[in-house]
């Protein structure tokens, strides 16, 4: 077994998207090879409805998959081919845009105004970019959860972990998408397939990830005499942690425990031509997509 080193830990950046939704972006619109096959990750968390109520009105997607995971509140979605529904707390929507879709996402908060969720963009390989759009809508009760003896709890959204398989299937990058909680002070080693790119996103509490490069705080451990034994880097709320190669990660939970997403996928390793929500392989394909938008032929059968 080989431990994955942490090659970077950085805070998510405040950003405004859609019709004025305030969110934090962990990565996106940078080097697409950095976390290939993943392109973008947003944390939309607010307690003021004015910061999210106008949502994400009609917009196009082609050549990618969008994965929305809601923790609190709900998201109403609708598209140009007649699909509609509501994604409630604990639910996941994995949308394969393929050849093209026009859709909108309108968030709603809880009775006291809280809204929290995540959106991840996954790239599609060239031979799947023009496939027919596909939705996988999963309610919270269909997501398996496993708990270890030390209180560590893992929700398995996609992929397999500790003998459980997530409900999302048929995804190009063969991803693993886990929601992990580790209790205060517990040290845990978690397996990650050697051939996947992997990252963690901390959204509650804090933890020390092995070899963290950018400290977000400190975790002080004391010996039995009460003396400080050593200090470790601590990655806290809204921190992205990128891992190098290996087949496991080690996490030492902080004094309040930690909850984070652990996401990995097989690299596609293809050229990327990217503009906004459209991601193709060549500049010509990108230009064709925008011509289709202008001509009204963007949403079409797969070929």
Image (cartoon, rainbow, N blue to C red):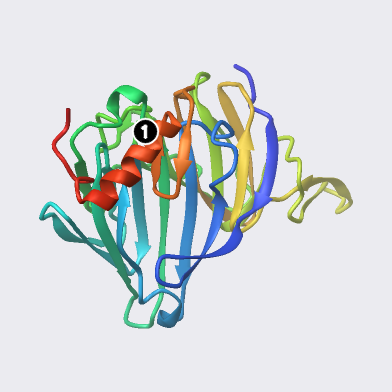
Residue under the image location 48 percent in, 26 percent down: 271
Q: In the depicted view, which residue is nearer to us: 123 or 255?
A: 123
Residue at the (25%, 43%) spot, across then down: 100
Please tell me which residue lies in front, 14 or 297. 297
Q: Is residue 151 visible?
A: no
Image quarter for residue 246? Answer: top right
Asked if 25 appears above or below 288 in the picture, the reply is: below
Image quadrant in which you'd find residue 170: top left
In front: 84, or 175?
84
Q: Looking at the rendering, which quadrant does residue 213 occupy? A: top right
- Where is residue 51? Give x, y as percent: 45, 77
Q: How many marks?
A: 1
Direction left: furthest residue: 82
Residue 261, percent from left and from top: 48, 46
Secondary element type, mark 1: helix
Label 1 sits on residue: 285
């Amino acid at each position: 077994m080989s431990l994955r080193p942490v090659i970077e830990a950085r805070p998510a950046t405040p950003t405004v998207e859609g019709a004025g939704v305030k969110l934090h972006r962990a990565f996106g619109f940078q080097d697409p090879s950095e976390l290939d096959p993943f392109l973008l990750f947003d944390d939309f968390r607010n307690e003021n409805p004015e910061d999210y109520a106008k949502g994400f009105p009609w917009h196009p997607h082609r050549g990618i998959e969008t994965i929305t995971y809601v923790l609190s509140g709900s998201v109403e979605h609708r598209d140009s081919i007649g699909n509609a529904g509501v994604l409630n707390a604990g639910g996941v929507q994995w949308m394969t845009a393929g050849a093209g879709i026009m859709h909108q996402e309108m968030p709603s908060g809880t009775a006291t105004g809280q809204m929290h969720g995540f959106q991840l963009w996954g790239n599609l390989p060239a031979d799947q970019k023009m496939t027919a759009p596909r939705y996988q809508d999963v309610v919270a009760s269909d997501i398996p959860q496993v708990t270890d003896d030390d209180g560590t709890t893992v929700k398995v959204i996609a992929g397999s972990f500790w003998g459980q398989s997530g409900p999302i299937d048929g995804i190009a990058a063969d991803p693993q998408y886990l929601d992990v909680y580790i209790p205060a002070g517990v040290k845990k080693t978690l397996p990650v397939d050697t051939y996947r790119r992997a990252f963690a996103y901390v959204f509650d509490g804090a933890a020390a990830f092995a070899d963290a490069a950018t400290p977000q705080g400190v975790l002080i451990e004391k010996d039995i005499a009460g003396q400080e034994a050593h200090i470790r880097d601590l990655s806290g709320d809204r921190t992205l942690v990128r891992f190098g190669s290996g087949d496991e990660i080690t996490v030492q939970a902080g004094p309040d425990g930690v909850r984070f997403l652990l996401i990995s996928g097989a690299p596609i390793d293809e050229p990327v031509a990217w503009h906004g929500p459209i991601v193709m392989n060549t500049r010509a394909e990108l230009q064709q997509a925008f011509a289709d938008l202008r001509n009204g032929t963007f949403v079409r059968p797969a070929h």
